[in-house]
Image: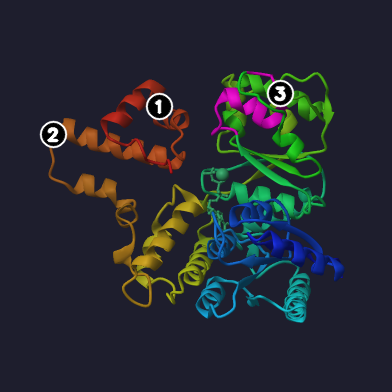
Amino acid sequence: MEKLRILIVDDEENIRHMLSILLRKEGYEVSAVGDGEEALKSLLAQQWDLALCDVRMPKMGGLELIDAVVERDISTTVIAMSAFGNREMAVEALKRGAYDYIDKPFKRDEILLTLAKAEERLQLKRENASLRGGEADGVFQGLVGSSEPMRALFETLSKVARYKSTVLITGESGTGKELAARAVHTLSPRAQKPWVAVNCGAIPENLLESELFGHVRGAFTDATHDKLGLFEQAHEGTLFLDEIGEMPPSLQVKLLRVLQEGEVRRVGGTRNIPVDVRVVAATLHDLGERVEEGHFREDLYYRLNVINVTLPPLRERAEDIGELVRYFVDKQNKRLGTAINGVSAEAMKIILDYAWPGNVRELQNCIERGVVLANGPKIDASVLPQRILEGNDELQQLFDSDELSIKKMSADLERILIRRALEKTGGNRTHAAKLLEISHRTLLYKIKDYDLETVGVE
Ligand SMILES: Nc1ncnc2c1ncn2[C@@H]1O[C@H](COP(=O)(O)OP(=O)(O)OP(=O)(O)O)[C@@H](O)[C@H]1O
Ligand SMILES: [Mg+2]
């Protein structure tokens, strides 16, 4: 078996030092960080088999870290460490998803025994997984689904992961693009190397360049020291460029050059630095359309779109809904310690009838909320959000009303259509305006008028 990789998380320097020496001597590969926040970053960036994690730490504590690990489906096995006598903490850690715990101060043999146990379990888990050729049935790298399009997607992802080709992931908001991107990394030979993600739409244009490519000291007023760009940080690993459609034109040129040449130049620098990075990009826009509109460079589009992976919207794979509901109920039960037993038949019917414009994310939010609000053993219809209960009936209700004012009826209809368009496009107004066949400016005006500013936007 390969060397097990263990991340030590403790705010005490002594303990980090002592454990590192001990575990390295035993042949484990070890790294140590001082708080939960750093640990989470590292757990997201690299594959760790085990995390030995103190419960009480500044910034993010151990319990919060365990929550984050469970929530993000990080496969690392967490073993909590808590001061001797603090049983409550230990029990709480186990409840939240830690695999085991160790009392501090600990004895060498105790630790080694606990690790050996965890190792044995990991080994078993791996054997089972390879027997089944994957994870639990119908779950692929955190993506749930057994429908035909999802199975095809899983196959594509496993195939493309092996190569270094650039992958462009498209799909509506909430369809799982980020999970798919991560799967490409995790299944690739680069899995043990960095995973670096950046949302190109969330960083102001003037900062994005130095974020991506770094800068040298003195490049601009605030550049007080050299800064490593994300490309360099992702060296030998994977760089995820989320919302690539939002990348400003000036940077599109620079990105293209980096992709072609495999070298970056820091802002203000004179040297080209070779980088070995696999790029995965995602967008909810139709990039081909953005090219036609002149918002996205054609050459960059072709360079990114070597392999295209499309995430199907949830409404086109209703057969996955039942599985997703079960998955999210279980996950939420684990997190909250509740024991909700699925959804009532009536609620399920409503859920199946709804169009889920926000896709899996919307379904997940709905179920998580349902588990919290449930009044009985199952989530029933009464705790589903209003918009889902109204579902597709809002138009019906409008037509059933006794209203005769053309002005009022038109306004109501307009509001419904605009809301739907925004939900459908994940709040993307350019796209929504197209669907509605009105100008972008008219749409902005009406959004304000009808108070729809937050629709489709999280
Ligand atoms: N098939 C799936 N199985 C389980 N969870 C899923 C699936 N698809 C999406 N999710 C969950 O739904 C949420 C949204 O997924 P993700 O962030 O990957 O979507 P996205 O396509 O990147 O959306 P956006 O375009 O809005 O960024 C996440 O919490 C993710 O874990
Ligand atoms: Mg995303």
- Looking at marks 1 and 2 on the same chain, the residue that comes earlier in the sequence is marked by 2
Magenta stretch: give its range: 200-220
Indicate the quadrant containing the N terminus: top left, top right, bottom left or bottom right: bottom right
| Secondary element at image label 1 | loop
Closer to us: mark 2 or mark 3?
3
135 lies left or right of 380: right
The amino acid marked with disc number 3 is: Arg
Indicate the quadrant containing the C terminus: top left, top right, bottom left or bottom right: top left
Q: Which residue is mark 3?
A: 217
Rendering coords of residue 248 (x, y %): 59, 23
- Looking at marks 1 and 3 on the same chain, the residue that comes earlier in the sequence is marked by 3
| Secondary element at image label 3 | loop
326 lies left or right of 392: right
Residue occupying image coordinates x 66% and y 27%? 210
Label 2 crowd (10 A; few <14 / some 14-19 / many >=20) = few
Rendering coords of residue 18 (x, y %): 76, 66
Q: Which residue is mark 2?
A: 405
Residue 306, visible in the rendered structure = no
Query: Are dots 1 and 3 in contact, CB under 8 Å?
Result: no
Magenta run includes residue 213 = yes
Residue occupying image coordinates x 56% and y 34%? 285
Q: Which residue is mark 1?
A: 437
Q: Note whether 197 is above or below 285 in the view shown.
A: below
| Secondary element at image label 2 | loop
The amino acid marked with disc number 2 is: Ser
**Image quadrant assignment for residue 457:** top left
Label 3 crowd (10 A; few <14 / some 14-19 / many >=20) = some
